Amino acid sequence: MKKWMFLAGLLTTMVAFGQNGQGATLHSSRYIFSPSGYSLPKDSIYLNWIGPLLDVQFAPTENLTLGIGTPAFLGVYVNGGYSMKVNDYTTAKVGALYGMPTYGQASFGLPFAVVTMGQPNANFTFGAGYGFGTGDFAGDLDGLALNLAGYKDFGGKTGLLFESWYLPEIETYLVAPAFRIYTKRDRRYWNIGFLGARYSYEQTEYPILGYDTDFDGMVDVTEQPSGANFWTIYDYNNPFLTRVWDTFRFPIFSYAMYF
């Protein structure tokens, strides 16, 4: 009970610092990590911090956004996106991210396209990209990436958002709901939520030949005895792969500051 009272008090305090304004419009180009179809206003620049990820985004023109960032200083990447208004309720963006680790000969990239439907204060975004990696330390980045995200603003100072990803090549699902807080005077944004994932991997297993009840290394019975007084004998010459599913979740925090 005390934990819930503390969290309620903390959220109330943060909301109290929020002020009415066009918060949803200014930061509508991004959810947490994934982009929307909207562009930044011309000459806008902001610093964005998402856990170990730090980047800077700049809009030299009304439709073009450029950026540079680093994942925990273990690498560096550049990115860009071009927005196009389809109609009053639909906006599209095409872009790409490309980078390399600080050490080693490698590279990674993600060309993408997204379509956003709605208005900056209430919208959904559908996106697709193709990740790739080459060389040492690049990891298993090759494959399609599908994205669904959305945002609902409440009066320009708070809002709810989510973004989700599906990576079919590695059978991984990720979802990140968050609460957004905006302060007009400081032009700052906080996203507070959690990241949950369900993923699979292949695990090597070995057929069971039988059970050793005499502890001499030989199979005595083929049906598992009761109790614990036996050894399991495996066929190590004929391994097979099975797919194992697992999940994880942890809190996430992001912060953006406009200049």
Image: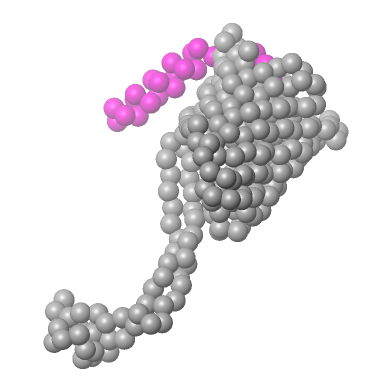
Q: Quadrant of the C terminus?
A: top right
First to last magenta residue range: 1-25
Based on the displayed image, in which of its 4 quarters is residue 37 positioned?
Answer: top right
The foreground one among 178 and 168 is 168
Of 51 and 141, nearer the camera is 141
Q: Left or right of 253: which side holds 7?
A: left
Q: Could you tell me how many numbered marks the image carries?
A: 0
- Whether 18 is drawn above or below 215: the answer is above
Give the residue at x 59% y 30%: 69
- Looking at the image, can residue 174 be seen? no
In the depicted structure, whether residue 207 falls above or below residue 51:
below
Residue 172 in the image: x percent, y percent? 54, 54
Q: Nearer the viewer, residue 77 or 24?
A: 77
Task: Assess whether residue 4 is covered by the magenta stretch.
Answer: yes
Determine the image quadrant of residue 221: bottom left
**Is 204 on the left-hand or right-hand side of 225?**
right
Image coords of residue 116 (percent x, y): 74, 37
Q: Main secondary structure of the magenta part?
A: helix
Q: Residue at x 61, y 50 (%)?
A: 134
Residue 181 falls inside the magenta stretch:
no
User: How far across and down, in percent of the image, does residue 27 sit?
Assistant: 65, 23
| Residue shown at the point (50%, 12%) measured from the top left | 17
Horizontal side of 56 relative to 219 (left or right) equals right
The quarter of the picture where the N terminus appears is: top left
